[in-house]
Image (cartoon, rainbow, N blue to C red):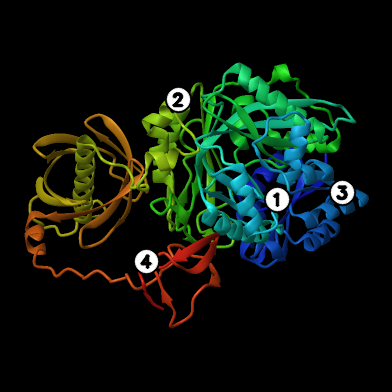
Amino acid sequence: TFEKLLIANRGEIACRVIKTCKKMGIKTVAIHSDVDANAVHVKMADEAVCVGPAPTSKSYLNMDAIMEVIRKTRAQAVSLNVSICCSFLSSLSLQASEGVTFIGPDTHAIQAMGDKIESKLLAKNAKVNTIPGFDGVVKDADEAVRIAREIGYPVMIKASAGGGGKGMRIAWDDEETREGFRFSSQEAASSFGDDRLLIEKFIDNPRHIEIQVCTVLADKHGNALWLNERECSIQRRNQKVVEEAPSTFLDPETRRAMGEQAVALAKAVKYSSAGTVEFLVDSSKNFYFLEMNTRLQVEHPVTECITGLDLVQEMIRVAKGYPLRHKQADIPINGWAVECRVYAEDPYKSFGLPSIGKLSQYQEPLHVPSVRVDSGIQQGSDISIYYDPMISKLITYGSNRAEALKRMEEALDNYVIRGVAHNISLLREVIVHPRFVQGDISTKFLPEVYPDGFKGHRLTDLERRQLLATAASLYVAEQLRSQRFLGTPRIPIAKSKISSWELSVHLGDGIYPVAVSKDGSSFSVEVDGTKLNVTSEWNLASPLLSVSIDGTQRTVQRISRNAAGETSIQFLGTVYKLQILTKVAAELSKYMPEKAAEDTSSILRSPMPGTVVAVSVKPGDMVSEGQEICVIEAMKMQNSMIAAKTGKV
């Protein structure tokens, strides 16, 4: 193959490429920004070179610096999976002249498919179904409004060079079109170095289904395969959250038609690597070309699970000039795979606003059978404002969908993440929701299921009793542990052992009397007049506790506790705050003064960390409710901050 390969990327995808390179005996070179000096991909690679400061435009998209590293390290090949910007295309030609192979398609395919405007025209010529819309570049906000009116609302405004939900806005009227044009063009310029936009009809309530394509250059071998589909309909802000393969919706005929159109498009641009053709599919199984991604997609592991192929290895072999080893008839659908994107985000804010911080504790659920975790972080890693807030891709596999989902449920319960907010609670609620389990999903799943925003898991009466019993048992187990020192009582003349405890547990808006008695390693807990038997090893030093409650197995995590009896427990994916007091302490607590809540009605506070890119007002200005005050950019997405009330700045 190649002796040395440079990986112009970071995070989990860089680690993924390095793993296959190690398997193939290829030495690797990692590039990194100064803040990523201790990143996992840097440690995994055989060599690592810093290419600039934190902003991607000055490091991971700094083509001059990357070219210099290629020369310096004498890398024979380069793998680039970050957003392709126009300035890199000329560099590709330069690499070819210097004998450096690009792991991916040639410049023509990248340029054609990386530009949504050109790719749509090519798709039409290849007789691929496309979404109605304007096929040219939108010049300004006025033209955007005119085009939107001609197409008919609602419309989708999107960056021509975009991807990953960035530079994309849905507009339902003229005002939203003007605002969408402004933010989309700014995000596109910031993320991709290209502010060109296009407008097309917004397909309401569709499914997002994509076909993985693996091809070889037509003029060398002419082989082309489609590797079945991935269902990617669970999204927030046009970014995928949960993916699975295959789709519950497609029948063999529709799957074949989509696959054949995807291959036709790949052959039309002489595509020569792994790539993904994305479609929107309506309720009648009509499908429309959305875009083609000329890179290894984030969700590629689910395809690898059901086909048994290593897509990175196939990309490297194709780049070296080998033909594909498989025929279309050889591509199976074996079992079912589900992927959850685990993000450092607060799911209670708009289904996920970015969170930053240091991972104080991190433990992947690799002890759960048939679980794969693709990550680029470790305990102690920093989640910063400069890059995508993804922590990992959590993948589970089963012989059928029910088995894969059950394993995902178990894996999410066993995933330990401390130090940053994360979206485990949202992911777990999605995969156990009746609509998702039945396969009744679309890109509007989250706003339809949670119209008032995500609030976490809502406990049933039985689950509430299980949580109260578990929390009370944990409290008593800790009290018993604190009485012992190296296995013996601290004070030899200590009073006789207490065998029962009367507690008061505060959960949500309720205060519940709970009685606990010890029976060997188990606790008998009475809640609401019902007795529950709680059994565990009670290893209080472990971040994970496997608890049996009347024979029902639960994995819980105690996130925090303090001397005032306040504790946070992750139960069924959601973190619940409780206060556990003895009966006497509970009676005395009513005399404790309550801290008055801060009045924040006159303060505009950013709900997430980021950079202020624009301020629309100045001191002394009068503003009305809903008026834009400033624009915050976080993780490459721009967000308008508005006044909550009328007043003076």
Q: Residue 541, percent across and down?
A: 34, 51
Q: Residues within 10 Å of mark 1 (few under 14, many from 20)?
A: many
The amino acid marked with disc number 3 is: Val
**Residue found at x 49% / y 34%:** 442
CA–CA distance between discs 2 and 4? Answer: 47 Å
Nearest to N terminus: mark 2 or mark 4: 2
Label 3 or label 2, whichever comes before in sequence order: 3
Identify the disc placed on residue 644: 4
The residue mark sitting in front, 3 or 4, is: 4
- Between disc 1 and disc 3, the foreground one is 1
Assign a secondary structure to mark 2.
helix
Q: Name the residue at 49% across, 50% down.
A: 343
Frontmost of labels 2 and 4 is: 4
Spatial separation of the CA atoms under disc 3 and disc 2: 44 Å
Question: Eyeballing the image, is 181 above or below 273?
Answer: below
Q: What secondary structure is marked by label 4?
A: loop
Mark 1 and mark 3 residues within 8 Å of each other at the beta carbon? no
Residue 100: numbered disc: 3
Q: Is residue 371 visible?
A: no
Please tell me the numbered disc located at residue 527: none
Amino acid type of the residue tagged 2 in the rendering: Glu
